Amino acid sequence: MRHLLSPLDFSVEELDSLLDLASDIEKNPDKYKHACDGKKLATLFYEPSTRTRLSFESAMLSLGGNVLGFADAGSSSAQKGESVSDTIRIISCYADICAMRHPKEGAPLVAASHSSIPVINAGDGGHQHPTQTLTDLMTIRSLKGRLDNLTIGLCGDLKFGRTVHSLINALVRYPNISFVLISPKELRLPDYIRQDVLEANNVPYKEVEELEDSMTNLDILYMTRVQRERFFNEDEYVRLKDRYILTPEKLEYAHKDMLILHPLPRVNEISVAVDNDPRAVYFKQVQYGVYVRMALILTLLNINI
């Protein structure tokens, strides 16, 4: 039995196989319509989510399976003080596979250590978000045709952005990757990612504070929102929340084939005027997320079609 707690749980070869399977699902959806007949996915979301939770549910339903679970901690026994380890022991009696989102870093790891079913980390605090990373990788590979030889700009909340942390961990394993880290000093990438991941793997990067300064050299621009829920100080959030807003005017500096990604939800960091730009692929990204989660469910349940 395997779990997915971090993008590093899969080798590069396994990631490529997973993305190949997701691409086949995209091209031949009818082939997989009954792949999970009789199987149940539990979605344990201790933290609010729209895209990730519904994407998992859509994925399982598209495979012919069923879904059960809860959408916030307040509607679960966590409100009564039940531990994550006890919850997963119970859920293991009801379901065949589980997707968990939790505000505390490491909660899915605790669950996996007590589970008799595969556990998928659907986001834990500011730590990791591996299925969003799989979605990002599929989007880039499908639209760029490669996952190597890329310069990726990461913009916004790089301190708390678990999607950013997971994406960096995944991409540094591919050749000729470099990063431009665009953030205010208060939201710069944590030292443990910069030193233990980028520098330890000799991955080139530079840190800048202005978006316009780096647009001309990017293959990918990955925008993120400043996350209100990660701030202890409301004044600090208000001061930083509008620091970066991508507009059509700023895009004049970018390559014509640069891709704009965003894990969503968007607040105002990408102007709606950008939505019709052919480089804006964040809504396509959502659809790729369903295919890749379908592939992941099949892989962790050892179902071959």
Image (tube, rainbow, N blue to C red):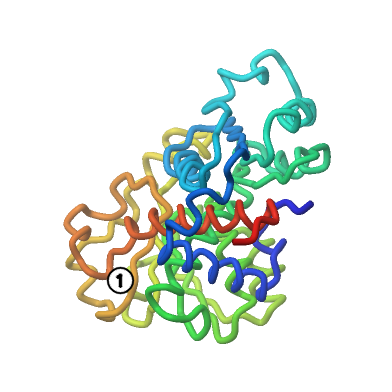
Establish if 11 lies above or below 270.
Answer: below
Q: Amino acid at mark 1?
A: Glu
Asked if residue 25 lies left or right of residue 221, the reply is right
Whole-percent x and y of residue 15? 62, 69
The quarter holding residue 262 reads bottom left
The quarter holding residue 79 reads top right
Within 10 Å of disc 1 (Cα), the crowding (few <14, some 14-19, many 20+) is some
- Seen at 24% across and 77% down, the residue is 253
Whole-percent x and y of residue 77? 67, 17
Whole-percent x and y of residue 156? 42, 57
- Seen at 55% across and 34% down, the residue is 67
Whole-percent x and y of residue 35? 56, 51
Q: Quadrant of the C terminus?
A: bottom right
Establish if 175 lies above or below 199.
Answer: below
Establish if 200 lies above or below 248.
Answer: below
- Seen at 56% across and 54% down, the residue is 131
Residue corresponding to mark 1: 212
